[in-house]
Image (cartoon, rainbow, N blue to C red):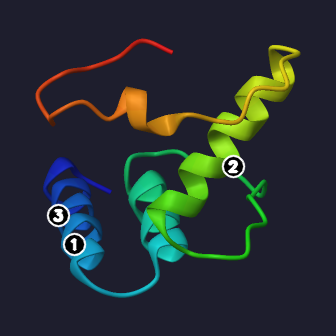
């Protein structure tokens, strides 16, 4: 696959985020970027909030804390970036 094909595949994958299934669109984008894995997350809701809740719950578990996940402090105003 040449660079033009790769670029077109990435653009297509990004356009797919306007509608459709978030998990499938994410998998397609990662594949277009050259990453592929058989490992997936099992979660009930297919929305960003569900992913964030799972992510921070797992992070808290790894850090051995019982605190409720607080993903709001990581959101900022869209211009800030936080290191986790």
Position of 38 relative to 44 (above/below):
above
- Residue that lies at the very extreme toward the bottom in this rendered image: 20
SS class, disc 1: helix
Question: Residue 11 bears which disc, if any?
Answer: 3
Q: What residue is disc 2 on?
A: 54
- Real-space Cα separation, disc 2 to disc 3, in angstroms: 28 Å
Q: Nearer the viewer, mark 2 or mark 3?
A: 2
The reply to whether dot 2 and dot 3 touch (C-beta < 8 Å) is no
- Real-space Cα separation, disc 3 to disc 1, in angstroms: 4 Å
Position of 31 relative to 67 (above/below):
below
The reply to whether dot 3 and dot 1 touch (C-beta < 8 Å) is yes
Position of 33 relative to 1 (above/below):
above
Question: Residue 31 bears which disc, if any?
Answer: none
- Residue that lies at the very extreme toward the front in this rendered image: 67
Q: Nearer the viewer, mark 1 or mark 2?
A: 2
SS class, disc 2: helix
Q: Position of residue 52 (x, y in %)?
A: 55, 48
* Closest to the observer, 10 or 6: 10
* Closest to the observer, 64 or 29: 64
For image coordinates 52% across by 75% down, the residue present is 24
Q: Position of residue 12 (x, y in %)?
A: 22, 72
What is the crowding at mark 3: few (fewer than 14 residues within 10 Å), some, or many (at least 20)? few
Q: Position of residue 30 (x, y in %)?
A: 46, 52
The reply to whether dot 1 and dot 2 touch (C-beta < 8 Å) is no
Q: Position of residue 70 (x, y in %)?
A: 55, 34
Mark 1 or 2, nearer chain start: 1
What is the crowding at mark 2: few (fewer than 14 residues within 10 Å), some, or many (at least 20)? some
Q: What residue is disc 1 on?
A: 12
Q: Quadrant of the N terminus?
A: bottom left
For image coordinates 78% across by 54% down, the residue present is 39
């Amino acid at each position: 696959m040449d660079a033009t094909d790769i670029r077109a595949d990435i653009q297509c994958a990004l356009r797919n985020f306007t509608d459709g299934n978030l998990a499938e669109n994410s998998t397609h984008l990662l594949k277009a970027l050259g990453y592929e894995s058989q490992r997936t997350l099992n979660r009930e809701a297919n929305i960003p909030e569900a992913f964030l809740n799972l992510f921070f719950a797992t992070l808290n578990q790894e850090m051995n804390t019982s605190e409720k996940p607080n993903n709001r402090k990581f959101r900022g105003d869209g211009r800030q970036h936080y290191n986790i």
